[in-house]
Amino acid sequence: MKVIDHINEAKDTLFSFEILPPLKGKSIQSIYNGIDPLMEFKPKFINVTYHREEYVYRERDKGLLEKVSIRKRPGTVGICAAIMNKYHVDAVPHLICGGFSREDTENALIDLQFLGIDNVLALRGDPIKTEAAFKPAIKGHNYAVELIEQIQAMNKGKYTMDEIHLEPTDFCVGAAGYPEKHFEAMNMDTDLQYLKQKVDMGADYIITQLFYDNNKYFDFVKRCRAVGINVPIIPGLKPISNLRHISFLPKFFHIDLPNELSSELLKCKTNDDVKQVGIEWGIQQTKELKAAGVPCIHYYTMSNSSEVKQIASELF
Ligand code: FAD
């Protein structure tokens, strides 16, 4: 079933979450171990991230270095199929522009359709670590809006080949939104214009980047509505759970931690202290968002569901 239909049918705020594929060589059991504790909250959909290739240097004979391309976390599509099969919950694979030609994208979408997957989160993807700026693949997409255009074309039976009367797909498409602005955007206004282009192109709903200040989300929704973005905007939350997160999350996701939270975090001496603050903060954020009637709350588990479980136990 499509995410947008789950949202339209819901009588209360829905619960959903995102997982990462395991590192290459690890068992899918680690995925099940992360999902099992959250099933009691009846997630309507589970997102699975996509991780493109990275370049690493391997030492060879005589001190030579070889540059090797590896994908550390393959398996997105297989995990989605396994989730649908085992839990009978809709899985939402993330599909990115980076590393995909239009034909690669088309083939990936055909696989998803054959597997009975109705949903895709359409993203551009970040630049690979060794590159300063995002570079599309040859014959690939520059921006998520172009990927959405291709998915919507396939939904009308238009593939990259010239033949007509091809089987239309029927994907529900999500897009990413940034309450604190995408880090490359010139300003919030231009970022919102591009977000509107994604919606006008056929994104059915938006999931936000994680944030810790609900006012930023409320303000973002207001600004979206003011420019004519009228689709559901699902807030994304990530409980802070260790000392490393305190600097990693703002740096990696280009977000701020509000003063009230940072002053609590500054008192923390251990990972357990941070975890407790993170859970309490997550509960407060969730309470306020639910009271405001948001359509769904989407939790980023980053492969660790224990904090999300504690938050959800209070509120779902
Ligand atoms: P876009 O919408 O293409 O925007 C990228 C930038 O370009 C923005 O600054 C925007 O303002 C600007 N822009 C957009 N359109 C145009 C245009 N036509 N002309 C000029 N400028 C334009 N990354 C992964 O690699 N794998 C994942 O699984 C993954 N999951 C994610 C899930 C969520 C919910 C979110 C919020 C992000 C996720 N990301 C993931 C990260 C995402 O790929 C990066 O944030 C990426 O840098 C931008 O992706 P986007 O789809 O928002 O890009």
Image (cartoon, helix red, strand yellow):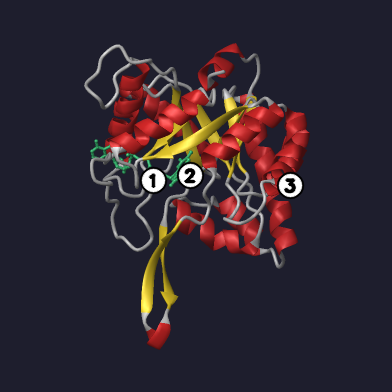
Disc 2 is placed on an element classified as: loop
Left or right: where does residue 174 sit relative to residue 82?
left
Q: Are marks 3 and 1 in contact (CB under 8 Å)?
A: no
Q: Which residue lies at the image location 71% right of the left edge and 42% below the top edge?
A: 32
Residue situated furthest bottom in the rendering: 62
Under mark 1, the amino acid is Gly
The quadrant of the picture showing ligand 1 is top left
Q: In the rendered structure, which disc, 1 or 2, sits on the residue that comes first in sequence? A: 2
Under mark 3, the amino acid is Ser
Residue identified by numbered label 3: 306
- Residue 7 point in image, percent of width and height: 56, 18
- Residue 52 point in image, percent of width and height: 43, 50
Under mark 2, the amino acid is Tyr
- Residue 67 point in image, percent of width and height: 36, 69
Q: CA distance from mark 1 to mark 2?
A: 9 Å
Residue identified by numbered label 1: 125
Residue identified by numbered label 2: 50
Indicate which label's residue lies in the foreground, 3 or 1: 1
Q: Are marks 1 and 2 in contact (CB under 8 Å)?
A: yes
- Label 2 CB-ligand 1 distance < 8 A: yes
